[in-house]
Amino acid sequence: GRKVKKKEQELNDMVSVIVPVYKVEEYIHQCVDSILNQSYKDFEIILVDDGSPDNCPNICEQYKKSYSNITVLHKSNGGLSDARNAGTKIAKGEYITYIDSDDFIDANYLLTLVNLIKKYDADIAVTGMRTFWKEEWIAKYKGTVKEYCFSGKEALKNMLRQNALDTSACAMLLPNKIARN
C-alpha cells in the first residue's frame, strides 16, 4: 500500500500549459476546451495574447473569468517563441507543455506525458501529433503505439533525422527548470 500512495502522490505535479494566442478566433474554443477536459487535473493554463488584433483577447478574458486555473497575459506582438517565453516566465508548474492555439489535445494528453516521465524517470516526455484538415472527420487512432527511451545524444540524433522525434515545441512535457534555460 505504501508504494501505491507514493506513486499517486508523484503524479500530482502541477503542469503549466502555455498557449500562445494570435488570430485564432475560429479555433481557440476547441483548443482551450480540450485542455480543460483533461483527465489529469493538476494544471494551470496560461493564455498568452500576443497582441492579437481580433476578438481573441476578449475570449481569453472570458475564460479567465470562468476558470480559476486560467491566467491571461496580454503583450505586444512578438511572435510564437516570444509568446512561449513570456508564458514560461510566469509558469508555476513543475512541468511545462506548449499547445498551439489552433490545435487541440486528447483528454489523456497530460496524463500520458506525466506517466511517461515517471515510468522512465525521464527529463522530457514527447508524444506524437496528427495533422488533418478542418473538413476531415477525425477517426480514432488505430496504429501501434510505440514507446522509446533515449539518452540525450540519441534523442538529438532522432530529432535531427526526424525519425521517432519531431523538433516542434508542442507535444512535449519538460521540467520548468529546463524550459526556463
Image (cartoon, rainbow, N blue to C red):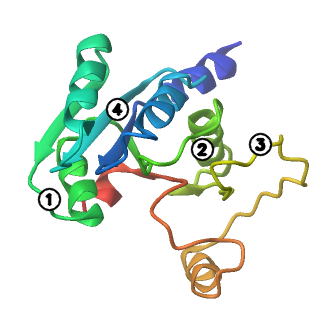
Front residue of 116/23: it is 23
Q: Using the rendered view, name the quadrant where residue 66 is placed.
A: top left
Q: How many marks?
A: 4
Q: Are discs 3 and 4 less than 8 Å apart at CB?
A: no
- Which residue is nearer to you in this view: 152 or 166? 166
Q: Is residue 25 above or below residue 157?
A: above
- Depth check, mark 1 against mark 4: the one in front is 1
Point out the residue furthest to the left here.
Answer: 76
Say which residue label 2 marks. 113
Say whether disc 3 or disc 4 marks the residue closer to the N-terminus: 4
The alpha-carbon separation of the residues under discs 1 and 4 comes to: 20 Å
Q: Residues within 10 Å of mark 2 (few under 14, many from 20)?
A: many
Inspect the image, locate mark 3, and give the three-letter code of the amino acid beneath it: Trp
Judging by the rendered image, the residue that carries numbered circle 3 is 137
Quadrant (top left/top right/bottom left/bottom right) for the N terminus: top right
Q: CA distance from mark 1 to mark 3?
A: 33 Å
Query: Regarding mark 2 in the picture, which secondary structure is present there?
Result: helix
Label located before the other in sequence (2 or 1) = 1
* Mark whose residue sits in front, 1 or 3: 3
